[in-house]
């Protein structure tokens, strides 16, 4: 669940060093500039929510960090190494410490779930198929899927199960940093809330650092330690939700303090009150 500030993080740490440092990042497509001199830190152990209006480049930023988009200029330091300056081999070594959940899931439709999750284990970890599929079944269980899901195909699954299976594949190589692109998109409110709880549980249990692109206010309130707002080609603000919501900016005020933002805030406050009464 969301922490009021970094001092309240569940792992007991009060300060986290950056595992990702983005500096002076510029992304452009032809004459269209998406990001210009963008700076952002991702701190070890946190769940960072990234929000912004349409066209602000939330997914472009994620893809730039994970190596699927080449920035025009700038620096992306991960674990102290500048990805943009590294050789392809050295960059690949670092990127294997990433897990990525794409918005569409990106599962292979011709493979069942355990085969899907075994692919990176065979290709990158060098495991034999029987061992890889055994580990794949463990990853599926980790995300809350039943044992019989392992031999089912993506077309046979609900949207929520596809999300969990895709998350299991993102966790296949035991990543240190998990990237999630709109993970609750397309889920009903109950499924989205369950997925939010799963993200926090896995972060706490596995010691993950999470970079989360979302537009879902409920997800922000229930999962994120900090929130970064993209606006005008840059990061307008990156701070706790309370401080971000107080930022004097028209989009921020409409987003966080409009009717939906107030509803999400009230719902989260009710949840906290009930939790405190039970303790």
Image (cartoon, helix red, strand yellow):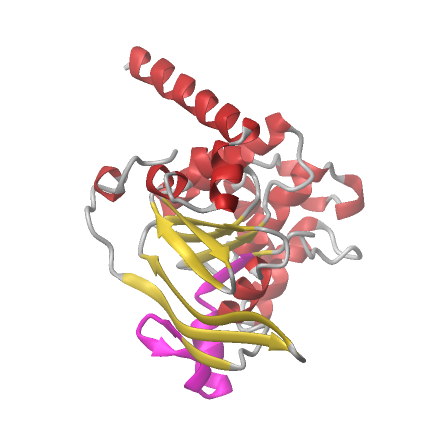
In the image, residue 277 sits, relative to residue 178, either above or below, namely above
Question: x%, y% of residue 220?
Answer: 47, 39
Q: Going 55% across and 58% down the picture, which residue do you hit?
A: 58
Percent from the top left, x then y, of residue 211? 45, 54
Q: Is residue 78 left or right of residue 142?
A: left
Q: Residue furthest top?
A: 277
Rendered view: 36 above or below 271: below
* The one of 172 and 176 positioned closer to us in this rendering: 176
Q: Residue at x 54, y 36 (%)?
A: 195
Q: Residue at x 57, y 59 (%)?
A: 56
Q: Which residues are magenta?
A: 76-100
Residue 153 visible? The answer is no
Q: Tell me the quarter of the picture where residue 27 sits.
A: bottom right
Q: Residue 109 colored magenta?
A: no
Please report the residue visible at 41 percent of the width from the left and 17 percent of the height from the top: 270
Residue 144 vs 237, above or below: the answer is above
Depth check, front residue: 87 or 123 = 87
Residue 258, image x and y in percent? 53, 31
Residue 87 sits inside the magenta stretch: yes
Location of residue 223 by image quarter: top left
Res. 70 image quadrant: bottom right
- Taking the image as shown, residue 56 lies to the left or right of residue 86, namely right
Q: Is residue 261 visible in this depiction of the protein?
A: yes
The N terminus appears in which quarter of the rendering? Answer: top left
**Residue 243 placed where, x, y %?**
33, 41
Position of the C terminus by quadrant? top left
How many marks overall?
A: 0
């Amino acid at each position: 669940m969301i922490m009021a500030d970094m001092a309240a993080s569940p792992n007991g740490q009060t300060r986290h060093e950056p595992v990702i440092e983005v500096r002076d990042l510029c992304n452009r497509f032809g004459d269209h500039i998406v990001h210009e001199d963008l700076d952002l830190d991702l701190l070890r152990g946190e769940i960072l929510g990234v929000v912004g209006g349409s066209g602000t480049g939330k997914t472009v930023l994620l893809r730039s960090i994970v190596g699927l988009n080449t920035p025009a200029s700038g620096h992306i330091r991960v674990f102290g190494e500048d990805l943009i300056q590294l050789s392809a081999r050295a960059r690949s070594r670092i990127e294997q410490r990433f897990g990525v959940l794409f918005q569409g899931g990106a599962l292979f439709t011709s493979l069942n779930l355990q085969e899907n999750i075994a692919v990176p284990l065979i290709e990158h970890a060098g495991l034999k198929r029987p061992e890889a599929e055994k580990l794949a079944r463990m990853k599926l269980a980790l995300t809350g899927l039943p044992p019989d899901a392992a031999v089912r195909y993506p077309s046979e699954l609900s949207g929520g199960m596809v999300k969990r299976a895709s998350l299991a594949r993102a966790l296949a190589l035991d990543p240190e940093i998990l990237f999630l692109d709109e993970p609750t998109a397309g889920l009903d409110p109950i499924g989205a809330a369950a997925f939010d709880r799963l993200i926090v549980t896995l972060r706490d249990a596995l010691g993950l650092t999470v970079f989360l692109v979302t537009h879902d206010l409920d997800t922000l309130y229930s999962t994120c330690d900090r929130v970064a707002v993209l606006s005008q080609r840059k990061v307008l603000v990156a701070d706790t939700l309370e401080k971000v919501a107080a930022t004097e900016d028209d989009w921020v005020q409409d987003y966080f303090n409009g009717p939906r933002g107030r509803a999400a805030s009230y719902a989260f406050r009710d949840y906290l009150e009930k939790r405190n009464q039970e303790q």
